[in-house]
């Protein structure tokens, strides 16, 4: 804990406010957890630990569960049975349902209008709020930092600790502030900014840090853009990402199911939230400046999200043996144009880019157009709520008229453990967050990009920016 009255960063303030026990020379700190998000893949062992020890759950009321990773995105059969890809997937889902019933946890089950990818659902419900500590057995828990929360991904053993104690053992990370000045150019999205930052930092450039994003270009992002940015923080190796809450945060949360209503605590909550910011003289272990105007539509070409370039640039020469291997796997050679690369599959969805604004962006590109004959395109809403909104706006009809598949919410091709897989050797432009070898299916090749780029690439059948559709003679 820092001396009283010393200027503190937002991260320091949240850390101090949740400290149960200080870090010792040989022992990590103990941090209280306000919200524990749970899904079917990383939780079974945690519940088994409770049973083995005869322990009760510490705070079922601060735990929220959903079904997302293993869930098929195809509709059920006439008899109501779900097309699970494996018996293990079916069992994982059933085990979480059983565990939630046994331990009294609220579960967004198959029939719930709240069900969605864990990092889409939490904010939608207003369960994610500024000032909270939030954990989940999924790396991309950093998403929730967009609200000025301190949000960590945790391992399966830690899931058991949190279920039993509502606390997390944690060494205090260092702090970094990334200040993005100026404005993003037209057609440049939060995904492009995130890929640009990871490239700037290098894949492990954030290791050991909690990153606070600040600056005019970050303030100008809406909450969905901020979630995309914080979601990808983990891909630079950082422990968490965060953005101080402001009026954009407040307006997003107003009226959500788990947020106090006006006249019954909302005003007090807002006053508290808006105090959550780094003091003007707060010290950071590292500070980075980025000019937002220099960011261009960006795409990855390698097997980590840091291997990215502006779409119009040529694949650079590998800097080391790892990058050389990555290029070989991806089927690129130094000097290749990204815009010439044939695309076989397009995936629009995930906790990075499966929200309503992402689907609207993709639909704007697809409206009145058809995807190339050789392309398969899956569009997967991040939650039931996103699906409902998108269908009310007719976005599903735009997707299907363009030749794409409109699916049920879930992680889908982001993790390829639910039946949605990119075949070996094929190239996918994907709005998700990971592109390591085999992430989207054994032998699959993933190019990470924004929804606008993904949709434009589906139409042209090769890597393209949405601006290229206007000038491309092959497109009417
Ligand atoms: S969409 Fe991908 S990254 Fe996000 S929670 Fe699902 S598997 Fe994890």
Image: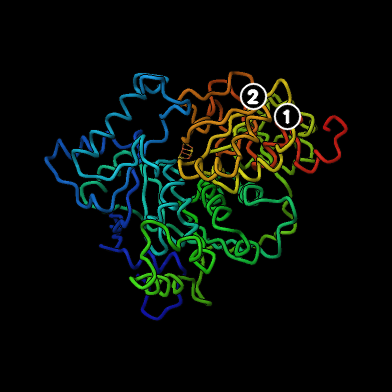
> How far apart are labels 1 and 2 at the CA level?
11 Å
- In the image, residue 227 sits, relative to residue 368, either above or below, namely below
Say which mark, if any, is on residue 354. none
**Residue 129 image point, x, y percent:** 40, 60
Query: Could you tell me which secondary element the residue under label 1 belongs to?
Result: loop
Of the pair 427 and 369, the residue shown nearer to us: 369
* Residue 409 in view: yes
- In the image, residue 349 sits, relative to residue 259, either above or below, namely above
The residue drawn where x is 41% and y is 24% is: 76
Q: Is residue 20 left or right of residue 174?
A: left
The residue drawn where x is 61% and y is 40% is: 395
Q: Is residue 100 left or right of residue 440?
A: left
Q: Which residue is mark 2?
A: 376
- In the image, residue 455 sits, relative to residue 198, either above or below, namely above
Of the pair 202 and 430, the residue shown nearer to us: 430
Of the pair 388 and 38, the residue shown nearer to us: 388
Q: Is residue 175 left or right of residue 87?
A: right
Q: Is residue 196 left or right of residue 209?
A: right
**Residue 80 image point, x, y percent:** 36, 23
Query: Could you tell me which secondary element the residue under label 2 belongs to?
Result: strand
Q: Which numbered mark, 1 or 2, is in the foreground of this view? A: 1
Say which mark, if any, is on residue 370. 1
State yes or no: discs 1 and 2 in contact (Cβ < 8 Å): no
Say whether disc 1 or disc 2 marks the residue closer to the N-terminus.
1
**Residue 64 image point, x, y percent:** 32, 47
């Amino acid at each position: 804990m820092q001396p009283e009255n010393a200027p503190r960063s937002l991260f320091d303030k949240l850390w101090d406010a949740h400290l149960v026990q200080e870090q010792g020379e040989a022992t990590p700190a103990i941090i209280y957890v306000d919200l524990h998000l749970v899904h079917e893949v990383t939780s079974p062992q945690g519940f088994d630990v409770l049973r083995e020890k005869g322990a009760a759950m510490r705070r079922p009321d601060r735990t929220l569960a959903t079904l997302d990773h293993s869930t098929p995105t195809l509709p059920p059969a006439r008899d109501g049975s779900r097309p699970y890809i494996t018996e293990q997937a079916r069992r994982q889902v059933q085990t979480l349902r059983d565990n939630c019933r046994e331990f009294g946890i609220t579960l967004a089950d198959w029939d719930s209008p709240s069900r969605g990818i864990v990092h889409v659902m939490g904010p939608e419900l207003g369960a994610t709020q500024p000032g909270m500590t939030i954990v989940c057995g999924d790396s991309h828990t950093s998403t929730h930092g967009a609200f000025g929360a301190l949000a960590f991904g945790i391992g399966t053993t830690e899931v058991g600790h949190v279920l039993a104690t509502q606390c997390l053992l944690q060494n205090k990370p260092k702090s970094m502030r990334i200040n993005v000045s100026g404005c993003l150019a037209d057609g440049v999205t939060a995904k492009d900014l995130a890929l640009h930052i990871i490239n700037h930092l290098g894949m492990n450039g954030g290791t050991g840090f909690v990153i606070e994003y600040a600056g005019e270009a970050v303030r100008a992002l809406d909450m969905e853009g901020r979630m995309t940015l914080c979601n990808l923080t983990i891909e630079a190796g950082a422990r968490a990402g965060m953005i101080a809450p402001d009026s954009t945060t407040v307006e997003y949360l107003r009226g959500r199911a788990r947020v106090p209503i006006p006249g019954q605590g909302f005003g007090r909550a807002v006053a508290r939230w808006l105090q959550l910011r780094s003091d003007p003289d707060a010290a950071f272990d590292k500070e980075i400046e980025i000019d937002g105007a220099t960011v261009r539509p960006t795409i990855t070409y390698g097997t980590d999200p840091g291997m990215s370039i502006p779409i119009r640039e040529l694949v650079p020469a590998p800097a080391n043996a790892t990058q050389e291997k990555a290029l070989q796997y991806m089927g690129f050679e130094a000097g290749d144009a990204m815009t010439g690369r044939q695309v076989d599959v397009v995936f629009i969805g995930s906790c990075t880019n499966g929200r309503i604004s992402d689907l609207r962006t993709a639909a704007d590109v697809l409206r009145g157009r058809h995807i190339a004959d050789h392309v398969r395109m899956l569009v997967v809403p991040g939650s039931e709520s996103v699906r409902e909104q998108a269908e009310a706006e007719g976005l599903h009809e735009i997707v299907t008229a363009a030749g794409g598949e409109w699916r049920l919410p879930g992680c889908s091709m982001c993790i390829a453990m639910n039946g949605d897989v990119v075949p070996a050797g094929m190239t996918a432009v994907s709005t998700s967050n990971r592109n390591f070898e085999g992430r989207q299916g054994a032998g699959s090749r993933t190019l990470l990009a924004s929804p606008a780029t993904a949709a434009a690439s589906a139409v042209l059948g090769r890597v393209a920016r949405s601006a290229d559709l206007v000038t491309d003679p092959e497109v009417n």
